[in-house]
Structure formats: C-alpha cells, structure tokens
Amino acid sequence: MKDTNVLKLFWPETCPFCGKVHSESACPACLPAVKRLELKGPRCMQCGKPVRRTEDEYCRDCAHTYHHYDRGSSIWLHKPPVSTSIYRFKYQNQRNYGSYYAEKMTEKCGAFIRACDPYLIVPIPLHPRKRRSRGYNQAEILAACLGKLTDIRVDSRGLARIRSSSPQKLLGSSERRRNVRGAFAVTEHFRPVPSVLLIDDIYTTGNTVDAAAEILKKAGVENVCFLTISIGQGY
C-alpha cells in the first residue's frame, strides 16, 4: 500500500464545510450552498465586497473610509457554511482546510493575484501569546499553501504583532480601529519589496489589514493588496 493511501486510512479527507468524510474534499451536498456564496456581479473597486449596482464604484465602508491597502479580494461571503468552516479552521485545529482554501484562491482569484504582481505573500500575524495558546496561525498555514501553488515567496517573519488586542468581532467600527492601532511592526527580517499580498481568513471592516498595510508602506512597500477566504456584506 502506498504511503498516501496509508495516510488517508488514518486521516481521511473531510468536507471543510460539514466535516463529514468525503473523498473529494467538499461534498456534493455542501457545494450548492457554497457556490451561492461565491463573489460574483458588481464589486467594490477597493475591498471587493459586493455592491448592489454596477454604477456603485465603492461599498458603504470604502466610500467613507481611507484605506492604506490598495486593493483586495476574497472567495466567498462570510455566511454559513463558509463561516462555520473558517471557525473550524481557526479554532478547532482543522489545519488541513488550508490547502483547500488555497486551491480555491488560485482558482477563483488567480487573475487578481496576477494583477497585484506580489513579490511576497505575508500572512497577518498573531500575537505570540495567542499563537502559543492556539498552537498555530491559520493565516500562516493559508499563506504557505498559496505560496506553493503560485510559486510566490512567503515571508512569515517580516511582520509581527507586537500588541495583543481584543477579538475584532466583539467591537464596533471605531473601537476596531483603536484596537489594532500600533498592533503591528516590521522585524529585522523584513526587506522592502515593491508589492506585497497580505493573507488573512476574514475581511469585515478592514481595520486589521489596514493597520498591517500602513506599517508595510512605512517600511518601504509601494503596493499592498489583500486576499481572504471570506468577506462581509458591502451594501
């Protein structure tokens, strides 16, 4: 028996959306619901959230907020079963989901990645205390998988989270901005490049990505784009 078959015997493929064992990763029962959450139609020119009308250039958030990043994109809206899947990936040690998400990123957002032309892929870092508690950084796993598929170098040491913060989902918009202010810094390992692609799991108001992008641009990066698994509604 081949090694890969032995691995599948003890660690079989599971659907990232319902958690049931299935040989093709995402099971046929979940795919219709997931497909409905794919981002299609008119989208915000900056963050990539869906907008109601083709004449709307920006979503409600981006129309009233200055962002330090240049452009962003995502695969799905942040609704079940995608949101449930990300929760398992993030908090229940389902690290194997990272390869599935990365495959979908290259499939659905390949043109966006090429347009960004990143010299580096940089995952949004966790504070060391939170990383020790969780045991891993889900954004780092996702970035590593995406780097292998795109042949783009991944830098997981150049950007650090130097200040712990409260979970963003518990806060309002202005509180979220304050929560991540001064949270990031570049390390001695970072070397400025013309463009960077930031990787995270979820984009809501963009404050976390913005705080990281601001630091990278102050360090000499000209263009910063982001790519996430899911994104909030933009209407």
Image: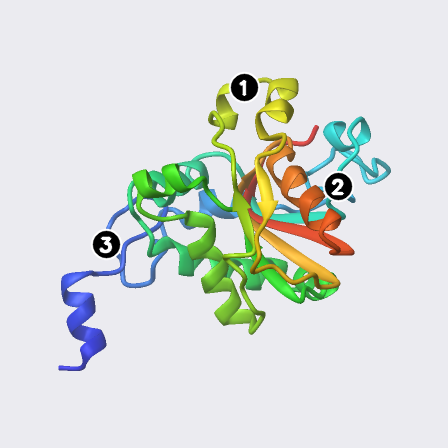
Amino acid of disc 3: Val
In the image, farthest residue toward the right: 55
Quadrant in the picture for the N terminus: bottom left
For marks 1 and 3 on the same chain, the one whose residue lies earlier in the sequence: 3
Location of residue 229 in the rendering, given as x and y in whole percent from the top left corner: 52, 47
Q: In which quadrant will I find the C terminus?
A: top right
Kindly report the distance in space between the C-alpha atoms of the residues bearing marks 2 and 3. Answer: 42 Å
Image position, residue 206 (x, y; %) = 64, 35
Q: Residue at x 60, y 19 (%)?
A: 175
Is disc 2 surrounded by few (<14), some (14 to 19) or many (20+) residues within 10 Å?
many
Closer to the N terminus: mark 2 or mark 1?
Answer: 2
Q: How many marks?
A: 3
Amino acid type at circle 2 is His
Task: Label 1: state its secondary structure.
Answer: loop
Q: Residues within 10 Å of mark 1 (few under 14, many from 20)?
A: few
Q: Which residue is mark 3?
A: 21
Toward the viewer: 63 or 27?
A: 63
**Three-letter code, disc 1:** Leu
Q: CA distance from mark 2 to mark 1?
A: 21 Å
Q: Which residue is depicted at the point 60% across and 33% down?
A: 204
Q: Is residue 129 above or below residue 123?
A: above
**24 relative position to 53: left or right:** left
Q: Provide the residue designation for mark 2.
A: 68
Q: Label 1 to label 3, Cα distance in Å?
A: 36 Å
Classify residue 201 as left or right of residue 98: right
Q: Kindly report which numbered mark, 2 or 3, lies closer to the viewer in this rendering.
A: 2
Choose top left, top right, bottom left or bottom right for residue 177: top right
What is the crowding at mark 3: few (fewer than 14 residues within 10 Å), some, or many (at least 20)? Answer: some
Nearest the viewer among 220 and 203 is 220
Q: Which residue is mark 1?
A: 171
